[in-house]
Image (tube, rainbow, N blue to C red):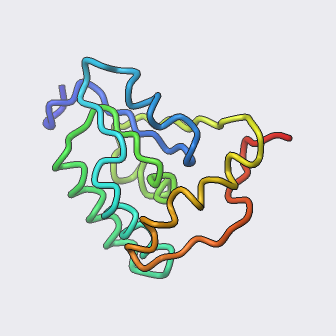
């Protein structure tokens, strides 16, 4: 056990629509979070992409983790912080699952998050978003 009481720490760095719900449900007897603090996470991560200092994102991710202390953290926007995660959570293990399937899976994602993004003051344009792992 670690000082957070975790037996292990698994962090999902998946893209949206590539299994975040399934990963969060793979360990039913463990503390697992799916999209924990999602609205705020989106705000902070998108602010970082817009040029906010990386220290703000790092502080938020550490504070978020301290509040939840998950053993499995499956939040789709964490892929936007993939470069910071190993340094912030050196004992964690990371998973990235790619979802093969029609490219339109990734075309539908912007429409599904557009209302939430609008709430944060960010916007997603139409078109293919992150077609990694898509086929056809």
The picture places residue 108, in percent across and down from the top left corner, at: 64, 53
Q: Nearer the viewer, residue 93 or 65?
A: 65
Q: Residue at x 66, y 36 (%)?
A: 99
Q: How many marks?
A: 0
Left or right of 45 on screen, residue 102: right
Q: Position of residue 27 (x, y in %)?
A: 34, 20
Residue situated furthest top in the rendering: 29
Question: Could you say which is closer to the camera, residue 32 or residue 113?
Answer: 113
Residue beneath the point at 86% across and 41% down: 136
Residue that protrudes farthest toward the right in the picture: 136
Residue at x-position 42% and y-position 34%: 93
Percent position (x, y) of residue 89? 34, 46
* Residue 54 against residue 89 in the figure, above or below: below
Q: Is residue 109 above or below residue 34?
A: below
Side of 16 relative to 98 (left or right): left
Question: Residue at the location (50% across, 73% down)?
Answer: 49
Looking at the image, residue 31 sits to the left or right of residue 34; the answer is left
Q: Is residue 38 above or below residue 124?
A: above
x then y, percent, for residue 112: 53, 56
């Amino acid at each position: 056990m670690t000082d957070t009481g975790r037996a292990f720490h698994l962090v999902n760095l998946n893209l949206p629509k590539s299994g975040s719900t399934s990963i969060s449900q793979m360990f039913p007897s463990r503390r697992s979070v799916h999209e924990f603090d999602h609205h705020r996470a989106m705000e902070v991560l998108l602010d970082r992409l817009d040029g906010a200092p990386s220290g703000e994102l790092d502080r938020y991710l550490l504070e978020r983790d301290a509040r939840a202390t998950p053993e499995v953290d499956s939040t789709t926007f964490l892929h936007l912080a993939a470069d910071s995660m190993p340094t912030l959570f050196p004992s964690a293990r990371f998973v990235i699952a790619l979802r093969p399937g029609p490219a339109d899976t990734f075309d539908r994602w912007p429409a599904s998050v557009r209302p939430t993004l609008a709430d944060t003051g960010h916007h997603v344009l139409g078109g293919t978003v992150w077609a990694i792992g898509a086929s056809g």
